[in-house]
């Protein structure tokens, strides 16, 4: 296999994969992309399609926010149809498997290009991987004073002492409530709310 640089399509295997995408019918390209990513993401033994998986991931990343377009002369030249929304997560999983194996991340390039190749893979993975789900205030953005005030338990204000006039009315009500009920009354007293 010939490798001449550190881009997703800068090797013979990925370039051949790009030719296969161009030769396929538009409705067949998704299957070519999904298949290589699924086999890499769920591989239980050796990885046989690392370069194809990286190339496929770059095609998907080009349709994601923050992704870079595939402008390599060795990449696919045919326009890619809009890809299903579940493919970025699958591509991120495949790249995660590759990144977890330090041997795979450097095997395909020259030693002096290993860091640049690793940067390429990491950048693709960052574009494709879903952001972490946060809980609490952080999930709605940075905390502000207004947000903190809404989440802080309400503090009870100290009671305001009544004025002289209000105190007289209150004492009158308390005296009225404490007066004993008439002994001739046999029915319970019901308080009616006036509307």
Image (spheres, grey):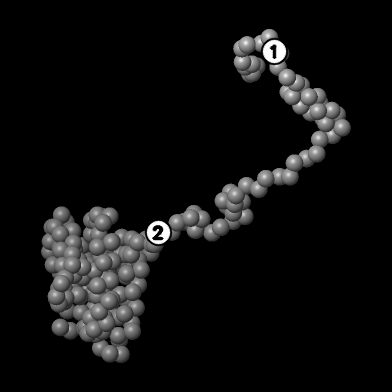
Q: Among all residues in the image, which is located at the extreme top?
A: 184
Disc 2: CA contacts within 10 A as few (<14), some (14-19) or many (>=20): few
Where is residue 80, by image quadrant? bottom left
Residue 183's disc is 1
Quarter of the N terminus within the rendering? bottom left
- The percent coordinates of residue 127 (x first, y second) are 35, 66
- The percent coordinates of residue 72 (x first, y second) are 27, 73
Secondary element at image label 2: loop
- The percent coordinates of residue 128 (x first, y second) are 32, 64
Q: Residue at x 24, y 84 (%)?
A: 103
Secondary element at image label 1: loop
Q: Residue at x 48, y 55 (%)?
A: 136
Residue 114 vs residue 3, the one in the foreground: 114
Q: Distance between the residues labelled 1 and 2?
A: 69 Å
Q: Residue at x 27, y 55 (%)?
A: 85
Where is residue 70, by image quadrant? bottom left
Where is residue 173, by image quadrant? top right
Q: Among all residues in the image, which is located at the extreme right?
A: 164
Could you tell which of marks 1 and 2 lies nearer the N-terminus? Answer: 2
Q: Residue at x 67, y 45 (%)?
A: 156
Write down the residue under mark 2: 133
Horizontal relation, residue 176 to residue 29: left or right: right
Residue 84 vs residue 68, the one in the foreground: 84
């Amino acid at each position: 296999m010939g490798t001449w640089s550190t881009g997703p399509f800068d090797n013979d295997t990925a370039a051949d994969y790009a030719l296969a995408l161009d030769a396929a019918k538009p409705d067949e390209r998704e299957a070519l992309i999904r298949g290589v990513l699924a086999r890499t993401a769920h591989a239980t033994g050796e990885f046989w399609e690392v370069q194809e998986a990286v190339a496929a991931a770059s095609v998907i990343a080009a349709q994601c926010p923050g992704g870079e377009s595939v402008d390599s002369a060795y990449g696919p030249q045919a326009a890619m149809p809009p890809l299903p929304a579940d493919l970025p997560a699958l591509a991120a999983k495949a790249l995660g498997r590759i990144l977890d194996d330090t041997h795979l991340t450097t095997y395909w390039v020259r030693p002096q290009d290993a860091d640049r190749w690793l940067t390429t893979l990491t950048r693709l993975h960052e574009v494709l991987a879903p952001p972490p789900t946060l809980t609490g205030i952080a999930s709605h953005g940075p905390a502000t004073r207004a947000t903190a005030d809404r989440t802080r338990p309400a503090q009870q204000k100290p009671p305001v002492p009544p004025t002289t006039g209000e105190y007289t009315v209150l004492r009158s009500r308390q005296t009225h409530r404490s007066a004993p009920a008439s002994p001739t009354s046999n029915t319970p007293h019901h308080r009616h709310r006036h509307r």
